[in-house]
Image (spheres, coloured by chain):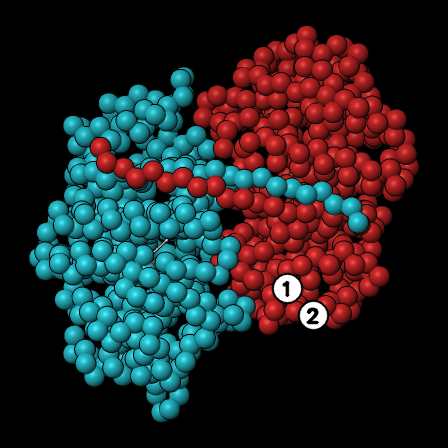
Chain colours: A red, B cyan
């Protein structure tokens, strides 16, 4: 038996910047970053792709970017700033995907150039995939513009597009070159998007950081009242927890089955799909957190009081904690629970789901008791369904 | 200026096995590998995708695979063994790509399953891309069946498909789970494919290992005479050199511009494209090696004798060393040299090309003198064009 063993490791490193008014000429963050990336004698290209929700809410943005870049040597815009439809639909749009691949081709975007995406999690996921597969990966800068993308999706290492309605069926793990979280973008978010991104903070607090959970309880009213300074702190702490997990887990590219950051997500993914994405990701996650928290208490892992605290926080944050699709129908498993079976298959027969041992402490199970789950759903329906 | 620094590294490890009659029940290699990958209580799926050139030359293969797998617990075939068209055209076929993505979806191939590709470099590149982007990467086993794929492409870390005629425009870096080089497959190769894969061995010998180059000179006749034992040694040594470079370069995913393994390739890629892939990759590389070797001698980097030794070896291996597309026309740069300009643009303005300092020693340049290049072409035309 002859073989050659191949072994190597690949180092990844990137910074996530927290700033405000990124393209104000007085703000040096983006300029300093680009300057750090110059190569003497070369002019590098920047292809900007902007979420149309952002473009509409910030009509001066394209001009600001163009003006900002004029002061920086060694870089130039590749073509026009490209505006793409924002929201989940862009991840279903194969034509749009190939239109952007075409742009990368015709504008000669190469492995020295940068594809810069400005937008919500959906646009970042889609553009991230374009950047990851063009020329086997061109440099990609993310400028997340929603709470969810600034505190979770945009600071991580995954991209993805949907395929035949299957969420994120196509994607890669591809760390960005840099991420710029500009708090100013958050001020133009519709209320739904402002609030729904908070559920990822509740999630990561519940599995990692009890004091952050308490902070969320204390600041829930301020958050609901659009306090930007409080939201900035939330984004920073939540991003830091996500990044610490990814960087410190020993499995940044998820080769194992353990996914603590997916607490509350097994039902969320199914709910998003079953509602045809009428539910925002963050709203679905809020429902998923509520279900899995009450289920954890029914298992005896956390107290009833803890479960109530969690649900009450979500309710205070004006996030949903129940959905009719969770319910059994005529004694048959609910459509969402069918999703659990699919998920089990998806994992190759062995389920791994994160639940709570305490507020701030996640733990995994490999079996879900469907009767107990139904009890959790009933509890939420009876006590909180009006929300 | 606030930022969070993310840093982590990802470890990769895989074995390349050298064997013969892989699916003979008496051969334990593949079985042992699978057994090492079992998880108690799980049945893992194997989706086999086979190059039709291989399927035709080995009509019993599908039955052999099915029988072989019956003795192994914890694994099962996912669906039927899928036969796909071999050769470059499969990398241009977007419909085929999505057909395989569909299979991965409908057969519920998950991150515990394996996509097994059996075929030449083109099929491996295409299936590798399918595996790399489905579910953000499912396990992928490569069974290369050509000289080129066993000694070079199949043991590396790249996949790719063509986009609008642009070679490998879409792809990723994605190390395989394991590679099985079965020498028996080589016995059914058309003469062209048997020979053309040897040029990658000449290439890697020239930049890395003078004694391997001498070995190739000594064994050229045996290789031309279809000596399988000699070919097996060639494949092993060549694969080992490629793997050592990738694993030891410090840049396995090519984030820098230095690509010594692409010696002879700048013109090869352009020739393949300009001839609409009538030239095999290995044939184009042979021409590219000849041009860049003579050019190296005209630069004074290697002796004229060394350049002649190299060209003579290629000629003895019945590989082409000249193509009319290399020539200037009416005083204008040849179409291939225009490719050099494109390549310079592609690299963002700074050319990095590997040439020879000696047989066994590569070195980089950042400028190519087009007049000197034309001289090299003329030399090959006048002295070797009849081949
Ligand atoms: N890659 C990951 O690790 C990861 C993690 C979690 C979620 N996600 C994905 O993120 C997506 C959800 O992202 P999201 O919650 O950011 O929503 P979104 O991207 O769907 O955007 C929601 C809406 O807000 C608009 N918008 C964005 N920024 C705005 C701004 N500053 N002002 C006004 N309008 C603005 C968009 O145009 C869109 O209409 C989902 O596709 C989800 O799967 C990815
Ligand atoms: N990923 C990489 O790092 C890398 C490196 C070098 C080359 N490549 C790619 O590899 C491809 C070329 O691969 P190739 O030279 O193996 O040729 P190929 O895959 O194009 O196959 C050539 C022909 O041989 C047939 N064939 C394959 N195995 C056979 C067998 N055992 N018996 C009979 N017929 C057989 C195929 O059906 C096809 O018709 C190109 O697309 C090139 O870009 C990739
Ligand atoms: Zn989420
Ligand atoms: Zn090659």
Dot 1: what SS?
Answer: loop
Q: Is there any visible trace of residue B107 in the rendered image? A: no
Q: Left or right of B208: which side holds A344?
A: right
Instruction: Find disc 2 in the rendering and name its residue.
Output: A73
Q: Residue at x 86, y 30 (%)?
A: A220
State whether residue A73 is above or below residue B210.
Answer: below
Contact? badges 2 and 1 (CB < 8 Å): yes
Q: Position of residue B130 (x, y in %)?
A: 42, 46
Q: Is there any visible trace of residue A71 in the rendered image? A: yes
When asked about the image quadrant of residue A69, the answer is: bottom right
Q: Residue at x 83, y 28 (%)?
A: A216
Instruction: Find disc 1 in the rendering and name its residue.
Output: A38
Q: Position of residue A132 (x, y in %)?
A: 54, 52
Quadrant of the image containing the C terminus of chain B: bottom left
Chain at numbered mark 2: A
On the same chain: label 2 and label 1? Answer: yes
Dot 2: what SS?
Answer: loop
């Amino acid at each position: 038996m002859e073989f050659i063993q191949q072994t190597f490791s690949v180092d990844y490193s990137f910074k996530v910047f927290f700033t405000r008014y990124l393209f104000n000429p007085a703000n040096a963050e983006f300029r300093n970053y680009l300057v750090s990336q110059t190569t003497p004698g070369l002019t590098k290209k920047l292809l900007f792709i902007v979420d149309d929700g952002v473009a509409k809410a910030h009509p001066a943005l394209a001009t600001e970017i163009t003006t900002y870049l004029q002061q920086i040597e060694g870089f130039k815009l590749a073509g026009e700033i490209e505006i793409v439809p924002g929201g989940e639909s862009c991840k279903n749009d194969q034509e749009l995907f190939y239109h952007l691949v075409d742009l990368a081709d015709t504008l000669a975007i190469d492995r020295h150039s940068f594809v810069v995406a400005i937008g919500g999690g959906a646009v970042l996921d889609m553009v991230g995939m374009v950047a990851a597969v063009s020329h086997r990966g061109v440099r990609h800068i993310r400028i997340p513009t929603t709470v969810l993308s600034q505190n979770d999706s945009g600071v991580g290492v995954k991209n993805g597009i949907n395929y035949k309605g299957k969420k994120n069926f196509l994607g890669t793990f591809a760390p960005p070159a840099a991420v710029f979280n500009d708090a100013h973008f958050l001020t133009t978010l519709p209320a739904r998007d402002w609030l729904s991104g908070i559920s990822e903070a509740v999630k990561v607090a519940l599995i990692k950081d009890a004091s952050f959970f308490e902070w969320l309880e204390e600041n829930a009213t301020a958050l609901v009242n659009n306090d930007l300074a409080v939201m900035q702190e939330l984004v920073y702490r939540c991003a830091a927890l996500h990044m610490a997990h990814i960087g410190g887990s020993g499995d940044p590219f998820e080769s194992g089955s353990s996914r603590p950051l997916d607490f509350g997500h097994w039902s969320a993914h199914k709910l998003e799909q079953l509602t045809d994405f009428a539910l925002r990701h963050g709203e679905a996650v809020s429902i998923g957190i509520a279900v899995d928290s009450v289920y954890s208490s029914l298992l005896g892992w956390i107290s009833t009081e803890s479960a109530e605290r969690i649900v009450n926080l979500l309710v205070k944050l004006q996030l949903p904690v129940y959905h009719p699709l969770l319910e059994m129908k005529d004694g048959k498993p609910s459509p969402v629970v069918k999703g659990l079976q699919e998920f089990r298959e998806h994992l190759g027969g062995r389920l791994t789901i994160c639940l709570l041992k305490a507020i701030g402490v996640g733990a995994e199970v490999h079996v879900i008791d469907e009767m107990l789950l139904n009890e959790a759903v009933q509890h939420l329906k009876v006590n909180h369904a009006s929300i």
